[in-house]
């Protein structure tokens, strides 16, 4: 049995500055994946099986993508784009089996079973996305957006909302209002931006809100004294 596998990928990108606040990145990519298997078995003894198998699979991939970004205002950074990948798959399979046997009269007979498949499939997909990064306060930003995907071959459609909240635009020392709440939190959050910092929002009761953030990207530990009421 002999097997082989190959994977080739190439792309070309172009960054264009249409205006000082408008950027576009265009990408064209191609790729190919190959997987083949060839085997045979030869047996001379009567009653044994002789077989040949050939299994070839090739997938070609083409993709065109554009990503736009617009620094619309001081508080809004817009992003949108599309991706159109096209896949073409070829599957060729051949299986030939021969079985030798003796009949009641002692003659050698041959039974032959052949399976031959040659299939070509093409699939075209479309992805659209858009997002708005909003500066809520001087140090706090949020991002809201959506993505739409469609697969032509199966006619599947999918809407994916996106919400990232909150992100800190610059490091701030962990703090909480004195006497506002009693909370101890330890956890982590992945930051969607290289410059953004993770943050936690803590609610101790309906009348108290504690905003807690940290310069540490992987953990937060905050403890504030309980609020007491004299009776």
Image (spheres, grey):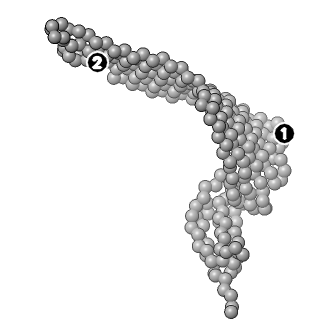
Q: Position of residue 28 (x, y in %)?
A: 67, 29
| Above/below status of 49 relative to 21 | above
Where residue 19 is drawn, which disc sits there?
1
Question: Looking at the image, which residue is at 71% across and 41% down?
Answer: 129
Question: Looking at the image, which residue is at 31% across and 12% down?
Answer: 112
Which element carries disc 2, helix, strand or loop? strand
Q: Is residue 209 left or right of residue 54?
A: right
Give the position of the C terminus as an image quadrant: bottom right
Q: Position of residue 194 (x, y in %)?
A: 66, 52
Q: CA distance from mark 2 to mark 1?
A: 67 Å
Could you tell which of marks 2 and 1 lies nearer the N-terminus?
Answer: 1
Q: Residues within 10 Å of mark 2 (few under 14, many from 20)?
A: few
Q: Is residue 149 left or right of residue 80?
A: left
Which element carries disc 1, helix, strand or loop? strand
Residue assigned mark 2: 41
Tell me where residue 81 sits by quadrant: top right
| Above/below status of 135 relative to 184 | above
Q: Is residue 116 visible?
A: yes
Q: Position of residue 69 (x, y in %)?
A: 77, 42
Nearest the viewer among 58 and 74 is: 58
Tell me where residue 18 sits by quadrant: top right
Nearest the viewer among 45 and 25 is: 45
Q: Is residue 45 left or right of residue 79?
A: left
Tell me where residue 43 sits by quadrant: top left
């Amino acid at each position: 049995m002999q097997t082989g596998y190959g994977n080739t990928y190439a792309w070309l990108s172009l960054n264009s500055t249409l205006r000082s606040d408008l950027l576009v990145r265009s990408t064209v990519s191609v790729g190919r994946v190959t997987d083949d298997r060839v085997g045979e078995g030869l047996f001379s003894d009567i009653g044994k099986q002789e077989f040949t198998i050939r299994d070839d699979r090739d997938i070609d991939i083409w993709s065109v993508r554009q990503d736009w970004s617009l620094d619309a205002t001081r508080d809004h950074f817009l992003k949108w784009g599309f991706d159109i990948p096209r896949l073409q798959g070829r599957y060729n399979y051949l299986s030939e089996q021969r079985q030798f046997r003796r009949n009641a009269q002692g003659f050698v007979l041959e039974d032959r079973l052949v399976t031959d498949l040659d299939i070509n499939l093409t699939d075209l997909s479309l992805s659209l996305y858009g997002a708005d990064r909003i500066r809520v306060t001087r140090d706090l930003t949020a991002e809201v957006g959506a993505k739409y995907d469609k697969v032509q071959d199966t006619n599947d459609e999918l809407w994916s909302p996106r919400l990232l909240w909150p992100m800190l635009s610059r490091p701030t020392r962990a703090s909480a209002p004195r006497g506002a709440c009693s909370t101890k939190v330890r956890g982590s959050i992945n930051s969607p931006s290289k410059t953004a910092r993770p943050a936690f929002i803590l609610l101790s009761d309906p009348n108290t809100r504690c905003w807690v953030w940290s310069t540490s990207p992987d953990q937060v530990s905050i403890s504030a004294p309980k609020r007491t009421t004299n009776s």
